[in-house]
Amino acid sequence: MTSTGPDPAPPAPRDRPTRKADALAALAAPHVDAWVASASPDGDAHLVPLSLAWVDERVVVAVEGSSATARNLTAPGRARLGVGPTRDVVVVDAVLDRAVGVDDDAALGAAYAAQADWDPRGLAGYAFLVLRPVRVQAWREENELAGRTLMREGRWLV
Amino acid sequence: MTSTGPDPAPPAPRDRPTRKADALAALAAPHVDAWVASASPDGDAHLVPLSLAWVDERVVVAVEGSSATARNLTAPGRARLGVGPTRDVVVVDAVLDRAVGVDDDAALGAAYAAQADWDPRGLAGYAFLVLRPVRVQAWREENELAGRTLMREGRWLV
């Protein structure tokens, strides 16, 4: 930062329909990564960047079945995913809908490979985690904290 | 992505001393945000982007004392912080060293305000969480997954 003056004012907050459209576009973009947080029964947080696909209103990630993310999410409890740079975020709280071997659902595998920048099909031990969003929030700067919740209890508010 | 050919090969993996230097530079950079993951006793993951400061080999964030992050981290269990874009990450597992009111440690407050792009001093109810790293990992692409652990059990390996 070489600016010597005050930071420029942030842009005006987006209205909520715009935020929803932007959030859906961010989730459906090619080659999008999310920071995927999950919790162990011992209270340790896990966090890992994963390529995601947005399929039928579900977030899909591919992980090794033995990974901490898979172990944590097959226990009760929510995942929380952060998408985008830290000043233009989409945050999704989600629960596991189902875990499926990467070669056990052809339509899902094709949809994932089409959006992500890698193709886990054929990799032994890998599974798709299909995560159902229950809350979606989106904000850029502090002036968008109000009104940031776009979905609550699995229902879009916008 | 408009490329029609295969993706370009990723750059060669960095050696470990370079990764450590890059990781420390990322943590000490002005105006750096982290994705901070924490876990509730119920197994719900929490995740929020926060401005951090790197002070005396500790990660410092400022949060409301009543926030989910503060509640989760004052219980046993580890936080996990992701810094950087998802293809050039520094991941820090950390435990709470201490929580201190934002006006109760002048040196800490000055160090935080000097690195972060906001100054929480004077805000009622806000606290600094001083997090002690116990594991630090850094990688860009898959070819850097080997050797990604730079600190283990609180000791730098490099």
Image (cartoon, coloured by chain):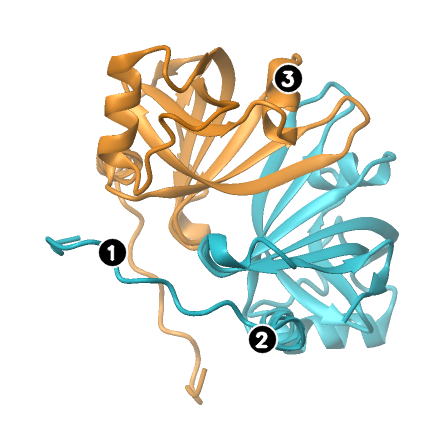
Chain colours: A orange, B cyan
Return the residue at label 2: B29
Dots 3 and 2 on the same chain:
no
Q: Earlier in the sequence, mark 2 or mark 1?
A: 1
Neighbourhood count class around disc 2 (C-alpha, 10 Å): few under 14, some 14–19, many 20 upward: some
Q: Quadrant of residue A73?
A: top right
Label for residue B7? 1
The location of residue A93, given as percent across then percent down, is 50, 25
Task: Check the picture and name the quadrant holding the C terminus of chain B.
Answer: bottom right
Label for residue A77? 3
Residue B98 falls left or right of residue A3: right
Chain hosting mark 1: B
Chain hosting mark 3: A
Residue A158 visible in rendering: no
Neighbourhood count class around disc 3 (C-alpha, 10 Å): few under 14, some 14–19, many 20 upward: many
The location of residue A84, given as percent across then percent down, is 39, 48
The location of residue A104, given as percent across then percent down, is 37, 11
Dots 2 and 1 on the same chain:
yes
Q: Nearer the viewer, residue B19 or A25?
A: B19
Q: Are marks 2 and 1 in contact (CB under 8 Å)?
A: no
Residue A134 falls left or right of residue A52: right
